[in-house]
Amino acid sequence: MTTSVKAQSRTAAGWKYFLRHKYMYLMLLPAIIYYVTFHYVPMAGAMMAFKKFNPMLGIWGSPWAGFTYFEQLFAMPKFYSVLWNTISISFIRLIFGFPFPIIIALMLNELKNQRFKKIVQTSIYIPQFISWVILGGIMVNLLSINNGLINGIIKAMGFTPIGFLTDEKYFVGTMVVSMIWKTFGWNTILYLAALSGLDPQLYEAATVDGASRFKQLLHITLPGIMSTIVIVLITRIGSLMQAGFEQIFVLYNPGVYGVADIIDTYVYRIGLQEGKFELAAAVGLFKSIVNFLLVIIANKVARMAGEEGIY
Amino acid sequence: MTAHATRHSNKIKTSLGSKIFDVCNIVILGLIALSTIYPFWDSLVVSFSSLKSYLSTNFHLWPGEWSLEAYAYMFGNETLWSSYLNSIFVTVVGTIINMLLTIMTAYVLSKKDLKGHRVIMFGAVFTMMFSGGIIPLYMVIKDLKMMNTLWSMIIPTAISTYNLIVLRNFFNALPQSVEESAMMDGCTEVGVLFRIVIPISKPAITTVALYYAVDHWNDFFSAVMYINEQKKWPLQLFLRSMLFENDMAYASGGESLYLLGQPMKMAAVMMAIIPIMCVYPFFQKHFAKGVMLGAVKG
């Protein structure tokens, strides 16, 4: 009996606390509704990958199908090709696209003319703010065989023009280079911020000791931005399953599906265009799980390396 | 004497090497800056060229023959204007809703002594790591009868968790003393948000609002997922149909037909870029700050 009285007074205190801060909790309400409706309900809805979906009955009412769709999926050669495309595109992008902004940031940091530095920064940030649809149009313009600049140069040098967007051999390379082109400028910002935080006294001391600029780079600059480099690397590894839906969706065509089709574009096509909702949901769920594991592993590795991690 | 001489020549050598490096550095960075700008310039030139002069060459450094035909055509295109209006609506209304929700939520979550803030924060951050995938989300939008409405481009992206964290970190870093003294003077927690926190956080709030606005303007994903009706197209869908879809030749790998309207296409591209270029100077002022705010651990 005493416990129930205690519990009662505790709930009463809880109520009092809640009422005192009611406006604060009220302000939280839209966010809670938003996250539940557009994130947690779809998470639960992912179970349609285990159901025989019937639009009349909805996801909840449809009968269970067990692992049927996953079995179907794992038996499909197309699934492995799509998975391979996703991983290889983002892996190549990581290898080339990850060091590039670091190098550019270091080069910018060595510039003595601040006005020139500002001009370069202003130009290289621009593509980040332009959508892939527009950039795609600009790429087609630039890469066109008969009337584009790049093939004009190739032809002027006496080589045969290249179908950058239509030839399977070149498509992935075109995607990787253009993705790096769009994002590298913006990605220098974090490094530049870290660089501007380094202690100028360290450089003065090193100069007095006769250390060359290269040595200063090796022994002061790089160690100084190492933690930033590691954090960015973790984030990038955590997003390896994101091969860039919008970019590829805008630029690919049936002629290059073999190398260009990634998980997201495949899910879109079989789900929303062919109406195989359960199979598409199964592919999507597979991707989410792998993605989740990657984030967890990347974060663990970061903690082991002595970094703080991202969550 | 010899030691002195060696040191001297050494110094000259390093400073010469250093100078060569500086020159190379400037040249390379200049070329890289040029490579990010030139594609836009090329498109601009093509948009002002006549079709004939466009087709005559691979190099478009300057219009061979000026023509405003492409723009004249685009100005007369009704779908362009309706999609322009749709994009403006989505951007303005979407950003207002984004900011209302993000500011309120970030403020509440920045109160570390408020019970339950940890659970909500975890709930939000978890959605960055795991999602149900696009098909279940599509089903939710469909069940909510949002298909083919502009709201499908606004409500399902009402809060970006990344921006929420950026703003919450900023609020967290504000000095507590000001807020406390205001509370002492009888200001409520909500009053503190509107009278103190928002006015002193203007730079951070502007940055986040600009992020949201650009995201809405460029949003292609939601449109492709939820909008079919041509009347409801935002600019990005109009552009896709105009740049990529109308050409059967493009899909089959051919070239001649798909180049027919190139100046016209580039005119459309330019018209879509202009609004971004107008806000770009504001961005310049704020964005680096925003990235750094986001870098602070969540």
Image (cartoon, coloured by chain):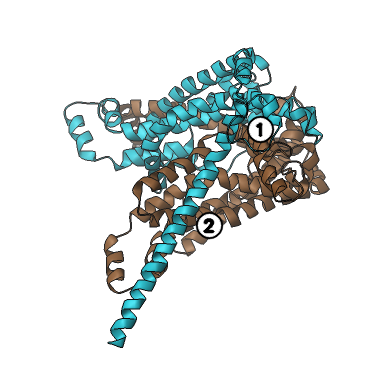
Chain colours: A brown, B cyan
Q: Which mark is residue A157?
A: none
Q: Residue at x 67, y 36 (%)?
A: A140
Instruction: Decide which of A108, A36 is in the foreground and name it.
Output: A108
The kind of residue tagged 1 is: Pro
* Residue B155: % across, % down: 53, 24
Q: Left or right? Give the position of A43 relative to A200.
A: right
| Up/down of A177 relative to B47, above or below | below
The kind of residue tagged 2 is: Pro
Residue B194 seen in the figure = yes
Instruction: Decide which of B36, B170 is in the foreground and name it.
Output: B36
- Chain for disc number 1: B
SS class, disc 2? helix
- Chain for disc number 2: A
Residue B120 seen in the figure = no
* Residue B163: % across, % down: 44, 37
SS class, disc 1? helix
In the rendered image, which quarter is residue A37 located in? top right
| Extreme residue toward the bottom, this view | B2
Instruction: Decide which of B163, B253 is in the foreground and name it.
Output: B253
* Residue A145: % across, % down: 73, 39
| Extreme residue toward the front, this view | B64
Instruction: Decide which of A243, A255 is in the foreground and name it.
Output: A255
Q: Residue at x 64, y 35 (%)?
A: A136
* Residue B66: % across, % down: 60, 24
Q: How many marks?
A: 2
The quarter of the picture where the N terminus of chain B appears is bottom left
Classed neighbour count for the residue bearing mark 2: other residues with Cα under 10 Å, few (<14), some (14–19), many (≥20):
few
| Up/down of B8 relative to B72, above or below | below
Q: Real-space Cα distance between discs 1 and 2?
A: 36 Å
The residue at which mark 1 appears reads as: B136
In the rendered image, which quarter is residue B107 located in? top left
Q: Which mark is residue A99?
A: 2
